[in-house]
C-alpha cells in the first residue's frame, strides 16, 4: 500500500525538520563545549622570571620562547609548596631591602592567552611556583 502524495510530503517535512533540529542540537553542544565559561585550565611551563625595578610588574621568559608579563599580586608558591595570594614572590623580591632581586629566577608559570575586544591576543601569567629557594 502506498501513501497518498499529501501524506508523503508531510512525512518528509517532519523528517527533514527532525534532522535539522538534531543537527542544530549536536552543533550547539559541540560549539558550547569550547566556550570559555567556568574554570579554564592554565598552561604551565618552566622558565625564568624577574620583577621590574618598580616592583609592581614582572616578566617571564619560558624555556620554549614564550614571553609574558605578570603583576605583583600574582598567586604564587614557594619551592616548598606554600601558596600565597598577592604579595611579591619571595624568590623574585628581597623583602628586607624592598627591592627586586638582581637576577632572574627559575620558576614554573601558569598562563592564559587573553583576547581583547579589538582582537589582540597576548599571554598573561596568573600563577607562579618558585623552583629556586
Image (spheres, rainbow, N blue to C red):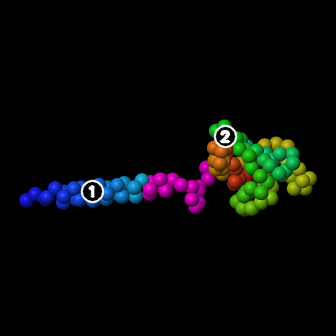
According to the image, label 1 marks what residue? 13
Write down the quadrant of residue 72 in the picture: bottom right
Q: Residue at x 72, y 58 (%)?
A: 75
Q: Residues within 10 Å of mark 1 (few under 14, many from 20)?
A: few
Which x, y percent locates residue 63? Answer: 66, 40
The disc placed on residue 85 is none
Q: Nearer the viewer, residue 44 or 22?
A: 22
Q: CA distance from mark 2 to mark 1?
A: 54 Å
Viewer-nearest residue: 50 or 14: 14
The part of the image, by quadrant, that contains residue 6 is: bottom left
Query: Residue pushed farthest front?
Result: 6
Q: Residues within 10 Å of mark 2 (few under 14, many from 20)?
A: few
Q: Position of residue 5 (x, y in %)?
A: 16, 56
From the viewer's perspective, is residue 87 above or below residue 122?
below
Tag nearer the camera, 2 or 1: 1
Segment tinted magenta in the rendering: 28-44
**Residue 17 image position (x, y, % from top left):** 31, 57
Q: Which residue does the image show at 86% across and 52% down from the upper left?
A: 94
- Residue found at x 57% / y 55%: 36
The answer to whether residue 8 is seen in the rendering is yes
The residue lying toward the viewer, choosing from 101 and 21, is 21
Is residue 48 inside the magenta stretch? no
Residue 121 visible? The answer is no
Q: Quadrant of the N terminus?
A: bottom left
Residue 84 lies, with reference to residue 27, above or below; the image says: below
Residue in the image at 65% along x and 45% along y: 118
**Horizontal relation, residue 123 to residue 101: left or right:** left
Q: Does the stretch in magenta take in 37?
A: yes
Dot label at residue 66:
2
Secondary structure at badge 2 equals: loop
- Dot 1: element: helix
User: Residue 53: x and y, percent?
Assistant: 86, 45
Amino acid at each position: 500500500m502506498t501513501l497518498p502524495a499529501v501524506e508523503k510530503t508531510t512525512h518528509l517535512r517532519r523528517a527533514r525538520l527532525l534532522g535539522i533540529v538534531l543537527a542544530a542540537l549536536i552543533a550547539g553542544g559541540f560549539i558550547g563545549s569550547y566556550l570559555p565559561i567556568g574554570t579554564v585550565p592554565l598552561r604551565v611551563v618552566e622558565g625564568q622570571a624577574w620583577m621590574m625595578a618598580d616592583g609592581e610588574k614582572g616578566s617571564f621568559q619560558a624555556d620554549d620562547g614564550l614571553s609574558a608579563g605578570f603583576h605583583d599580586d600574582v598567586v604564587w608558591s614557594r619551592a616548598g609548596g606554600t601558596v600565597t595570594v598577592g604579595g611579591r614572590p619571595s624568590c623574585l623580591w628581597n623583602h628586607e631591602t624592598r627591592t627586586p632581586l638582581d637576577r632572574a629566577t627559575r620558576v614554573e608559570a601558569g598562563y592564559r592567552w587573553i583576547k581583547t575586544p579589538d582582537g589582540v591576543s597576548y599571554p598573561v601569567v596568573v600563577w607562579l611556583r618558585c623552583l629556586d629557594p
